[in-house]
Image (cartoon, helix red, strand yellow):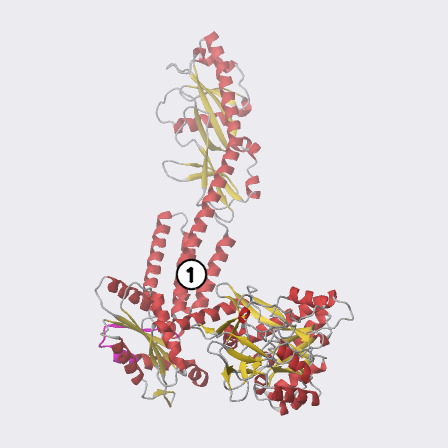
């Protein structure tokens, strides 16, 4: 059995088994005691009820004896002789008896019964007693049990007088006395009963009436109150009750024991002996219910056996089953002790090393879990050999991890040296099932010099160092540093991401897509945001990479699709039937690889009754490269449903023309404007025009992204691009705000906002005859001024305190308009310490015109 437990059991099994057996047995015992106590109280109350029905019959018998005694006293008062009562006929079931227990007067039909009662009374009373009313019985006369009450007769009914001439005796059949109590109803109520009398000399009970053929044991006894002032020894009755099923529900007890036995057997076969012992104990208790002392001894024996069994589990509770090393719980206890010693200055520095064995899962899959366990045992023996000379604790931390606590470490370098020594122990191959395998390990090390930290924080630091070591290709042992705390933030962010969907923290914003001819909204792109409870509103670049690594992109993509389709369905119901619009959704590489993508989209469209033309999907070229065949099949099925597809970020990735022909794209999104290698903003007209022309030649609709100013919008429109999207038109907005703009068909062309002060970055010269200045910003507001760039001819130096700037280009909307001056004169520019030059507008001495398109050119 021990060998079986050692091979089959594990630490969690042992812990749970101990808890289940100890707590379960205790609860069963308390339940039995509780039910038994409640049942006994109930039985006592029932017995008292029936006793109250019997006692009035005894009181009536005593009253009959008193009445006959009064009659006898009156006769004696007249005659002065007790023997004269022979001439007086007594009542039924009564007679007179002389002081020497002889019958003087009785009915002829009752003479034999009276004689028998007198004889019983004489034998039950060997010596003279005080003259007081007494009761005898029940006594057996013939086939009946009788109860007799005698009352002393004295002249004037002076019962207390010492000179008693005789007795009045009244008797009744026991069955007649209890007939009105209907004791048989106790059987229907679920009780067995006995009407019995205890013999004081033999300590045995005489049973007069019983519902059972066997004597009852473990009963509730209710004594019947007798009316006489004194009784003959042994002449009292008791009503004894016992429940049919015992004092606790047998079915409940059986179910509780069965549940405990099942759980114990399920956890480990080693509890088989204990279950049988409990069953034997149950049988022993059932047999020895009459002997409470013996039952208590048996219970004490069982408790001792349980204590012995618990002692056998103590070692397994704090040690790993396979390696024999201390387990995680023991390690944490030792770490807490070491931290207390640090706080009390008994130690200077401690270190914790977590070792993660590489390829452990691969070995489990290829050679089996038994081989993996054998590998851990061999690794444990090697690590024990390396750390045996050190003051510390080596423990099995997890499935493929070990933890080493080092006490009194000289320096962090010494801790790293120990980590490297552990790595050296793994260089020799391991023999596993006639295979020689080499394994490696990554190690996370942390050193602690202050005992103010918690054990959990120290292990977290070692785990962070271990995670960083796993990312490195060369160094496999990493010492924790304070700046590694950012890794913990990433772990926390990833953990929060798992709850984001459940707690409805994700939301969609919509950035309008505008017709460049009318500046009216024709659609919107659904953009994902995360309303983090601590970090605030997060953009996808903050969390999508973690979602990919955590495998959450598929459920997030499905949520975005469901949400966007729901918004589109709501808009369609509220907009006029002739008004067209669409919502585009970004597909990530993981979302595109989802085998249930097409079915999920089709199901949602049917559920919302939404035409597929109102939905478009965007994906980048990178999303198509993982599995071209699967991506093509999914996109083809979506396209056949009537959903249009967009190639996003065209011109910034591979820009492969084969992808445009291989996949069924309907639109391309072009990032605009472009930035050259020097970082200077410029609308690369030729490249953008070429891509727009290429899209048109392939019968693809071009949409320009990142349109940030009027110049870009005007240039794109001139190149033949029909649609644009960017902050120049609108930032991403809530669904309700986007719907209001769509329904109102408001123009998205920003209004001119003149400003008193313009801020522009320092100009840079590209070697040509022009200077290109970066766009001006209005410091008094949040919106950029309308012009993206200001192009001026080379500046000419005039007087010492003046700079002469050539006149601006003609107004594009009014080409015939002429400025009255050939030049503009401005005072020298004042430059602050920042990277921009501040130029107040009121310093301009020449005329300045403001039109809708060029209010930023100043």
Seen in the picture, residue 45 relative to 213 is either above or below; the reply is: above
Question: Which residue is denoted by mark 1 in the rendering?
Answer: 20
784 or 491: which is nearer to us?
784
User: Which quadrant holds residue 353?
Assistant: bottom left
Residue name at image x 48 percent, y 60 percent: 258
User: Which quadrant holds residue 119?
Assistant: top left
Seen in the picture, residue 221 relative to 334 is either above or below; the reply is: above
Q: Determine whether, in the image, residue 825 is placed left or right of residue 294.
A: right
Residue name at image x 43 percent, y 59 percent: 279
User: Which quadrant holds residue 718?
Assistant: bottom right
Circle 1 crowding by C-alpha within 10 Å: few under 14, some 14–19, many from 20: some
Pinpoint residue 753: horizontal percent, then vertical percent. Answer: 61, 68
Q: Determine whether, in the image, residue 540 is placed left or right of residue 568.
A: left
Q: Dot 1: what SS?
A: helix
Residue name at image x 43 percent, y 54 percent: 27
Image quarter of the C terminus: bottom right
380 or 177: which is nearer to us?
380
The verdict on residue 390 being magenta is yes
824 or 482: which is nearer to us?
824
Pinpoint residue 493: horizontal percent, then vertical percent. Answer: 47, 69
Stretch in magenta:
381-398
425 or 705: which is nearer to us?
705
Residue 650 appears in view: yes
């Amino acid at each position: 059995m021990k060998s079986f437990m050692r091979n089959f059991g594990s630490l969690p099994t042992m812990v749970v088994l101990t808890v289940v057996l100890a707590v379960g047995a205790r609860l069963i015992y308390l339940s039995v005691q509780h039910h038994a106590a409640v049942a006994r109280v109930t039985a006592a109350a029932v017995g008292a009820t029936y006793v109250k029905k019997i006692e009035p019959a005894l009181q009536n018998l005593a009253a009959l004896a008193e009445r006959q005694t009064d009659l006898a006293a009156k006769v004696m008062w007249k005659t002065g002789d007790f023997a004269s009562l022979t001439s007086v006929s007594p009542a039924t079931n009564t007679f007179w008896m002389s002081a020497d227990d002889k019958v003087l007067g009785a009915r002829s039909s009752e003479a034999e019964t009276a004689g028998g009662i007198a004889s019983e009374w004489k034998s039950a009373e060997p010596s003279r007693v005080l003259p007081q009313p007494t009761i005898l019985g029940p006594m057996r006369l013939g086939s009946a049990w009788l109860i007799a009450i005698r009352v002393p007769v004295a002249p004037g009914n002076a019962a207390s007088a010492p000179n008693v001439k005789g007795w009045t005796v009244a008797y009744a059949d026991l069955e007649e006395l209890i007939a009105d109590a209907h004791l048989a109803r106790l059987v229907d109520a679920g009780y067995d009963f006995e009407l019995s009398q205890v013999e004081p000399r033999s300590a045995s009970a005489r049973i007069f009436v019983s519902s059972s053929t066997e004597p009852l044991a473990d009963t509730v006894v209710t004594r019947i109150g007798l009316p006489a002032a004194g009784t003959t020894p042994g002449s009292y009755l008791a009503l004894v009750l016992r429940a049919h099923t015992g004092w606790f529900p047998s079915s409940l007890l059986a179910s509780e024991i069965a549940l405990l036995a099942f759980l114990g057997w399920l956890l480990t076969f080693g509890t088989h002996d204990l279950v049988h012992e409990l069953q034997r104990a149950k049988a022993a208790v059932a047999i020895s219910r009459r002997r409470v002392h013996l039952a208590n001894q048996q219970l004490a024996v069982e408790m001792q056996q349980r204590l012995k069994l618990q002692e056998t589990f103590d070692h397994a509770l704090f040690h790993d089953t396979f390696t024999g090393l201390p387990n995680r719980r023991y390690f944490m206890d030792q770490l807490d002790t070491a931290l207390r010693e640090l706080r009390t200055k008994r130690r200077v520095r401690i270190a914790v090393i977590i070792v993660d064995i590489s390829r452990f899962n691969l070995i489990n899959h290829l050679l089996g879990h038994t081989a993996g366990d054998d590998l851990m045992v061999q690794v444990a023996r090697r690590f024990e050999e390396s750390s045996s000379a050190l003051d510390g604790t080596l423990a099995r931390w997890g499935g493929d991890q070990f933890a080493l606590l080092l006490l009194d470490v000289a320096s962090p370098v010494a801790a790293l040296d120990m980590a490297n020594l552990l790595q050296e122990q793994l260089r020799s191959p391991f023999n596993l099932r006639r295979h020689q395998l080499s394994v490696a390990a990554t190690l996370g090390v942390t050193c602690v010099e202050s005992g103010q930290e918690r054990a959990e924080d120290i292990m977290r630091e070692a785990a962070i160092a271990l995670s960083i070591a796993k990312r490195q290709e060369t160094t496999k042992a990493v010492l924790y540093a304070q700046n590694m705390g950012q890794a913990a933030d990433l772990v926390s962010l990833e953990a929060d991401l798992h709850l984001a969907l459940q707690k409805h923290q994700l939301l969609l914003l919509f950035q309008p897509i505008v017709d460049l001819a009318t500046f009216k909204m024709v659609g919107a792109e659904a953009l994902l945001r995360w309303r983090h409870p601590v970090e605030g509103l997060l953009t996808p670049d903050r969390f999508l990479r973690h979602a990919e690594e955590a495998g959450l992109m598929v459920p997030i993509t499905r949520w975005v699709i469901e949400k966007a389709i729901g918004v589109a369905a709501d808009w369609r119901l509220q907009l006029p039937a002739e008004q067209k619009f669409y919502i585009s959704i970004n597909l990530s590489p993981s979302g595109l690889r989802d085998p249930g993508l097409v079915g999920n989209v089709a199901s949602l469209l049917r559920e919302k009754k939404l035409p597929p033309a109102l939905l478009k999907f965007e994906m980048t070229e990178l999303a198509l490269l993982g599995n071209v065949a699967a991506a093509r099949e999914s996109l083809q099925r979506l396209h056949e449903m009537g959903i249009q597809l967009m190639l996003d970020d065209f011109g910034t990735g591979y820009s492969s023309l084969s992808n445009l022909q291989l996949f069924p794209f309907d639109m391309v999104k072009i990032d605009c404007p472009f930035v050259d290698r020097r970082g200077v903003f410029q609308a690369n007209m030729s490249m953008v025009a070429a891509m727009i022309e290429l899209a048109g030649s392939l019968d693809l609709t071009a949409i320009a992204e990142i349109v940030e100013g009027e110049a870009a919008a005007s240039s794109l429109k001139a190149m033949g691009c029909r649609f644009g999207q960017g902050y120049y038109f609108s930032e991403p907005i809530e669904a309700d705000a986007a719907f209001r703009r769509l329904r109102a068909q408001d123009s998205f062309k920003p209004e001119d906002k003149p400003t008193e002060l313009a801020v522009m970055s320092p100009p840079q010269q590209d070697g040509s005859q022009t200077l290109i200045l970066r766009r001006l910003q209005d410091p008094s507001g949040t919106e950029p001024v309308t012009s993206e760039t200001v192009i001026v001819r080379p500046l000419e130096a005039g007087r010492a305190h003046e700079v002469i700037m050539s006149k601006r280009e003609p107004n594009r909307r009014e080409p015939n308009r002429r400025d009255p001056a050939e030049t503009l004169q401005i005072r020298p520019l004042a430059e602050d310490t920042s990277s921009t030059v501040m130029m107040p507008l009121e310093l301009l001495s020449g005329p300045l015109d403001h039109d809708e398109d060029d209010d930023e050119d100043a």
